[in-house]
Image: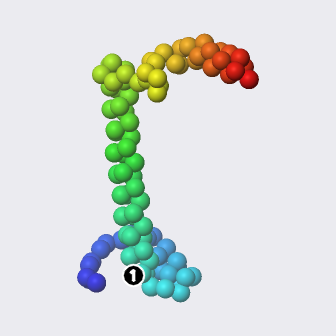
Amino acid sequence: MKRMMIQLTEEQIKALKELAQARKTSVARLVRESVAQYVVVTNKDADREEKRRRALEFIRKIKSGEIQSCDIEGKTDVARNHDKYLTEIYGTWKKSS
């Protein structure tokens, strides 16, 4: 471990001392645990932001026509014609039963 000097407000010091006493631990340990938790949360936020950025870029490409989405049969109009396709599927299913 490395020693480090930090500056906290009077209110922060008071709150940390009270919390440390209630938990029967040291202020230093609370600070270390807080820093560790902050690092984990910050990394998750960075990952989330990267995923968000990639999703927005994908949406932009779809809107611009750079990427065209389709179903497994290659149809690109499923959202507009889903009732028609369901009728075709269930009509075929009912006939074969």
The location of residue 93, given as percent across then percent down, is: 68, 22
Q: Is residue 19 left or right of residue 94?
A: left
Does residue 44 lie above or below 78 as drawn?
Answer: below
At a point 33% along the width and 18% down the height, the residue shown is 65
Does residue 74 lie above or below 20 as drawn?
Answer: above
Q: Quarter holding the C terminus?
A: top right
Q: Quarter holding the N terminus?
A: bottom left
Residue 16 in view in this figure: yes
The location of residue 34, given as percent across then percent down, is: 42, 70
Front residue of 1 and 73? 73
Front residue of 43 and 14? 43
Task: Provide the residue designation for mark 1.
Answer: 28
The location of residue 45, given as percent across then percent down, is: 39, 52
Q: Looking at the image, how many numbered discs can be counted on the residues?
A: 1
Q: Is residue 95 left or right of residue 18?
A: right
The location of residue 12, given as percent across then percent down, is: 43, 70
Badge 1 marks a residue whose secondary structure is helix
Answer few, some or many: residues within 10 Å of disc 1's Cα (few below 14, many 20 plus, some between 14 and 19): few
At a point 37% along the width and 22% down the height, the residue shown is 68
